[in-house]
Image (tube, helix red, strand yellow):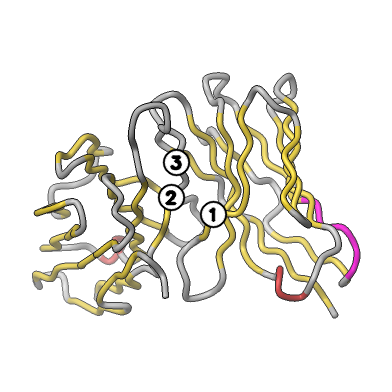
């Protein structure tokens, strides 16, 4: 079982809906990330949290709102999305500390989001 | 401007032969490189990495080569096995630690 768990695995929502994606990591890591993978595009970094503090917002539209209540949990709140937001949303974690800034990412299995 | 490029969307090899996956980057600040492997319906998993102070790193059947002057790295899998069939992502990091990913190459290993 992956150390990073994402729910739900699949989500279909209308453009006026509000939904949330959940991520939980069981690895004791201190950094968590949201990535977006669209068809035929590279993984795009959306948000980074280190020790619960947001350290990166990669010019993501405000209809995506992250929340990190503690080092183990990460949410992505969605509202008034567009059909082009349909993609695979991946959560990841890593251990960032001292010299070890090159810690590999540990990914969850993703949430396949479809906006209708 | 895409800073990490994997120019081959797909690669097909025979079981037992060598698979070579290529990756090019443009940012000279990148100094750490990683390969991830992704099966359908799963998230990417870390495979192997290399620091810019090295030109080769080996782990079992997997070897990554780095050519800094050409800004090119490659992943060699030998011998290839059907279970290696997956999408392989190249990623590059600078001092900040954030990774920039390529588009991925789909490897198919035929029995």
**Residue at numbered disc 2:** A105
Label 2 with label 1: CB-CB less than 8 Å: yes
> Is residue B19 inside the magenta stretch?
yes
The CA span between labels 3 and 1 is 10 Å
Mark 3 crowdedness (10 Å alpha carbons): few <14, some 14-19, many ≥20: some
Residue at image coords 43%, 50%? A105
Mark 3 vs mark 1: tell me if same chain: no
Label 2 with label 3: CB-CB less than 8 Å: yes
**Residue at numbered disc 3:** A103
Which chain is disc 3 placed on? A
Q: Nearer the viewer, residue B82 or B56?
A: B56
Boundaries of the magenta span: B16-20
Q: Nearer the viewer, residue B11 or B95?
A: B95
Predominant SS along the magenta part: loop
Q: Nearer the viewer, residue B12 or A95?
A: A95
The CA span between labels 2 and 1 is 7 Å
**Residue at numbered disc 1:** B46
Residue at image coords 54%, 42%? B91
Q: Position of residue B104 (x, y in %)?
A: 60, 54
Q: Is residue B19 above or below residue A52?
A: below
The quarter of the displayed image where residue B37 is located: bottom right
The CA span between labels 2 and 3 is 7 Å
Q: Nearer the viewer, residue A27 or B20?
A: A27
């Amino acid at each position: 079982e992956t150390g990073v768990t994402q729910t739900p695995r699949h989500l279909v929502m209308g453009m006026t809906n509000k939904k949330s994606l959940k991520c939980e990591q069981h690895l004791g890591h201190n950094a968590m990330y949201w990535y977006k993978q669209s068809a035929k595009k590279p993984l795009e970094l959306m948000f980074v949290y280190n020790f619960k503090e947001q350290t990166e917002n990669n010019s993501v539209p405000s209809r995506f709102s992250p929340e990190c209540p503690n080092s183990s949990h990460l949410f992505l709140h969605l509202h008034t999305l567009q059909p082009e937001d349909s993609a695979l949303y991946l959560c990841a974690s890593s251990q960032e500390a001292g010299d070890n800034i090159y810690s590999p990412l540990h990914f969850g299995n993703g949430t396949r989001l479809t906006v209708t | 401007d895409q800073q990490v490029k994997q120019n081959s969307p797909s690669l097909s090899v025979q079981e037992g032969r060598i698979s070579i996956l290529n990756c090019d980057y443009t940012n000279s600040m990148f100094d750490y490189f990683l390969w991830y492997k992704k099966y359908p319906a799963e998230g990417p998993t870390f495979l192997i990495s290399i620091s810019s102070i090295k030109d080769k790193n080996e782990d079992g059947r997997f070897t990554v080569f780095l050519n800094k002057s050409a800004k090119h790295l490659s992943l060699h899998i030998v011998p290839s096995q059907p279970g290696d069939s997956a999408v392989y992502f190249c990623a590059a990091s600078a001092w900040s630690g954030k990774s920039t990913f390529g588009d991925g190459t789909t490897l198919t290993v035929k029995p």
